[in-house]
Image (spheres, rainbow, N blue to C red):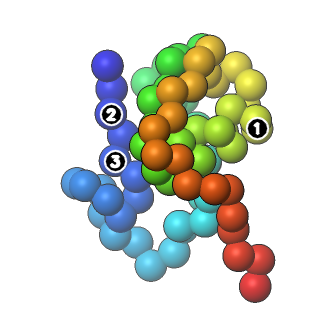
Amino acid sequence: MVSLDARGHGDSDWTPRGYRFSDRVEDLKAFCDAIGFTNAIGVGHSTGGVVMTLAAEKYPDLFSRLVEAGRKSIYERTS
């Protein structure tokens, strides 16, 4: 089992930019690529569940299953 702190959460550094869902999807993809994960079982809570869903849509081979708890709705302000 491997756990990822989202940008600006937990032990991850706070950056001035990069908090859009699309940024977080790319962070997750880069993390999975770096450790060699494909067809993983993803478990996400709240915004993490949204990020996993979006990543699974963009990168279909990334997850074999998703488990989401307390997921927020998918919404990204465009302006």
The amino acid type, in three-letter code, at marker 2 is: Ser
| Cα distance in 3D space between marks 2 and 3 | 7 Å
Using a 10 Å C-alpha cutoff, classify the residue at mark 1 as few (fewer than 14 neighbours), some (14 to 19) or many (20 or more).
Answer: some
| Residue beneath disc 3 | 5
The secondary structure type at the circle numbered 2 is loop
Q: Residue at x 70, y 20 (%)?
A: 61
Whether residue 59 sits left or right of residue 19 in the image: it is right
Quadrant in the rendering for residue 23: bottom right
| Residue beneath disc 2 | 3
Quarter of the image where the C terminus is located: bottom right
Quarter of the image where the N terminus is located: top left
The amino acid type, in three-letter code, at marker 3 is: Asp
Q: Are marks 2 and 3 in contact (CB under 8 Å)?
A: yes
Whether residue 64 sits left or right of residue 6 in the image: it is right
Rendering coords of residue 39 (x, y %): 60, 14
Sequence order check: which comes first, mark 2 or mark 1? 2
**Number of numbered discs:** 3
Whether residue 55 sits left or right of residue 79 in the image: it is left
Rendering coords of residue 11 (x, y %): 22, 54
Q: Is residue 28 visible?
A: no
